[in-house]
Image: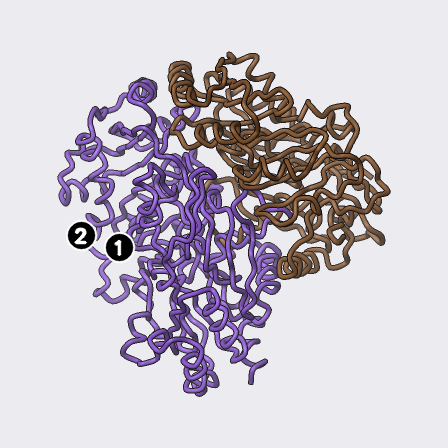
Chain colours: A purple, B brown
Amino acid sequence: MDMPKPDAGIIARKARIVARLRAALPQAAVIDDVHETRAYECDALTAYKCPPLAVALPASTEEVSTVLRICHEEGVPVVPRGSGTSLAGGALPTADSVVLGVARMAEVLEVDYDNRLMRVQTGRTNLSVTGAVEEDGFFYAPDPSSQLACAIAGNIAMNSGGAHCLKYGVTTNNLLGVTMVMMDGEVVEIGGGYMDAGGLDLLGLICGSEGQLGVVTEATLRILPKPEGARPVLMGFDDSAVAGACVSDIIKAGVLPVAIEFMDRPCIEATEAFAHAGYPMCEALLIVEVEGSDAEIDHQLALITEIARRHNPVELRESTSAEESAAIWLGRKSAFGAMGQINDYMCLDGTIPVNELPMVLRRIAEMSDSYCLKVGNVFHAGDGNMHPLILFDANKPGDLEKCEAFGADILRLCVEAGGCLTGEHGVGIEKRDLMHVQYAAADLEAQLAVKDVFDPAWLLNPAKVFPLDVTEGRRGSGASVAA
Amino acid sequence: MTITSETELVDAIRSAQAPLSLRGGNTRGMAGPGADLSLAGLRGISLYEPGALTLVAQAGTPVSEIETTLAAEGQRLAFEPMDHRALMGCSGTPTIGGVFAANVSGPRRLAIGAARDFLLGVRFVDGQGNVIKNGGRVMKNVTGYDLVKLMAGSRGTLGALTEVSLKVLPTPETSATLVLSGLDDPAAIAAMAQAMRSPFEVTAAAHDPAQRRTYLRLEGFETSVTYRIGRLKDLLSATGAALESLAANPSATLWRDLRDVAAFHGAAGDIWRVHCRPTEAPALAAKAGAEANLYDWAGGLIWLRMAPGTDLRARLGRYDGHATLLRADDAAQALPWQEPEAPGVARLTAGLRAKFDPRGIFNAEALALAP
């Protein structure tokens, strides 16, 4: 994976750039000491690191606007950062960039239960958004696994999902409005406390644009009343194709579970060794959760277990209490940690049409043999969002490269099966060079044209999302303007 | 001109020397300066996977054909697109491309999202004749920019849709409606807010001031619907409204009429839609002084029938929302159909338009934004 060569001219102007930022922001809000900028050298894709030129931590939309205006005038690339939990390298800096972190902007600005919305500053973490309203019986639906740490800013940038999006949708389906600062410092308001803004759906375009179109500082979010209750059922099968067929039948039957999670044998074994959740040793395990009153849950679980029985499960364990529910979820929630106990791992998130599940799992197993790298599959089966975890040894020369090649093959397979490269983590740098697999030149050009409109100088997070050769003539144009 | 393939469409756009008005079934009644270019000849469902809840169709496929296909598998277009024909006083066959191009959503939008939330992928031809695809046919996809959302609701100003891929949902076992009678507007809005704050999964909430009737729809398994109707009755007993419930069939008829704004059919006047915060709806409706109005989306959408030529936006002043003029009785009047955009947003819109349609040949009527 390559990053563009840093602009020596910008690095030479570091003192002036930092001085301008210092003059505009409070003292502690600008970091340029080489020991301190190291804290921002990577995100959760830790295989790639590069300390930035400087870090700015503004505390308001106005300060964000000031930082961006200065960087725009100086022709300095800006890498927006939420909490730095991206698995795709979305917040990876370059040596000639200013990291703009929104972590100091974490206020709840408004809670409006009657209209079921809240407005927050985007540095606020996902879980603490729900935390601000849960005592009153509400929650914010998108729930990425990193929700304890990840910021709403990053959720919007990556259009994050989570385990419960089968029923509640992903970030774009729960976002009503944003305050966004453009690269030149202009502040725009898009959408608001109402459904469906008029005009072009700029909100939909901004959500998932990986910090390349603007810096979102405030967001109006849809909040929902908590269900009366929720309970899962665990089912084991001796064939992953059968488990896949069972998922399809549940969906076709008109039950809409809030989550359908899938784990394969390597993942079950790792999880059992780590968390002792009491899972059956089998080829495929499903956890299906439904919501409602006790009677409603009983009714839905009865339908689901009836469907499951037709597929000859080796295990069928319906939760009847909060303790049993927790036990069923325990293994699933520890799956990533369990795999991490075995070795380093790389987590992919390609999505496939649900009906292609058996074929894709079989092909992944074949590739695993030929690459001699173990892979465990744990994923959101209801929506086809896979999470193959490839195990490798970071200390073994060549293993990371082998793992990346294997990962790329899996993602090509996802596209071939009618799916896509990434379902919820984003492209970042990780899948940047695979965009050609999913999109033809004209498809990519149309996306680049959007960035041309929002950020004509290509200063916002410029080395991400698109293959570098495709963006070659566009990146760096800002530096020459300022010189 | 009616084209029957994407290749023909590309040729038609590349060779166009004058503005074009892209049309699906032409049921929105929008007259434009360009030559009509109908996409209704692009027909057919190319893929339907009930177990994956996805369907792919050519843009000109009639909505009715898709609904029939889905019904055979017990599924539906969950966002409940309205049928504009009676309200707009026009004929024609609504197409799936038209539904997404105008982001048409019905009463269930309140609970499960708009048309744009169900659009998974698109193919379209831009103003220079480039064929572009974006998204796909899977429910979770963050690969690159979401041009799918950009195309939804763009009304043919950026490109001509040729194919759409969408998410469908199972049709629930049954539905029922709880009817509250006798509430004035503020009390009705408060009752709907109370219902929406409950965990009982109301899938539509509307209020008809003329009849002082407030409607709350529930859908799901029979036992669950019965249970939730009971709980809502308890919850709303303090409103003092008379409470009765409608069974599945009358409920379905009621919501079809509310979806299509049947109360306004055949009546003269301008038809407006106001999107706002539900709790602000009664005050906005009072300011509007409409000849008739109707609240949907628990108040988040107000339908208004106004005397021809009334400048509703001037009456409403500033609020968190926007007003759309859907039907103007007097075509000669110059009110823009869409709320004028703030300068920063207007620049982005114009910039996108210049990129996707640099010759400015698509749907000038849909861009009539300036007052």
What's under tag 1, amino acid-wise? Tyr
Helix, strand or loop at mark 1: strand
Question: Could you tell me residue A413's position as x and y percent?
Answer: 43, 47
Marks 2/1: CA–CA distance: 9 Å
Q: In which quarter of the image is residue A386?
A: top left
User: Is any atom of residue A100 visible in this view?
Assistant: yes
Chain letter behind tag 1:
A
- Residue under the image location 59 percent in, 58 percent down: A441
Residue B159: x and y, percent?
69, 49
> How crowded is the residue under tag 1: few (<14 C-alpha within 10 Å), some, or many (20+)?
many
**Labels 2, 1: one chain:** yes
**Nearer to the camera, A150 or B151:** A150
Q: Is residue A462 visible?
A: no
Quadrant holding the C terminus of chain A = bottom right
Q: Nearer the viewer, residue A248 or B362?
A: B362
User: In the image shown, does B165 or A211 lie closer to the viewer?
Assistant: A211
Quadrant of res B256: top right
Residue at (75% x, 30% y) in the render: B88
Amino acid of disc 2: Ile
- The answer to whether marks 2 and 1 mark residues whose Cβ atoms lie closer than 8 Å is yes
Residue on which the image places disc 2: A342
Q: How crowded is mark 2: few (under 14 residues within 10 Å), some or many (20 or more)?
A: some
- Rendered view: A18 above or below A462: below
Label 2 marks which chain's residue?
A: A
Numbered circle sitting on residue A76 = none
Q: Quick one: SS at disc 2?
A: helix
Q: Mark 1 points at which residue?
A: A345
Q: How many labels does the image show?
A: 2
- In x, y percent, where is residue B22? 76, 43
Which residue is drawn at the image coordinates 36% and 38% (left, top)? A138
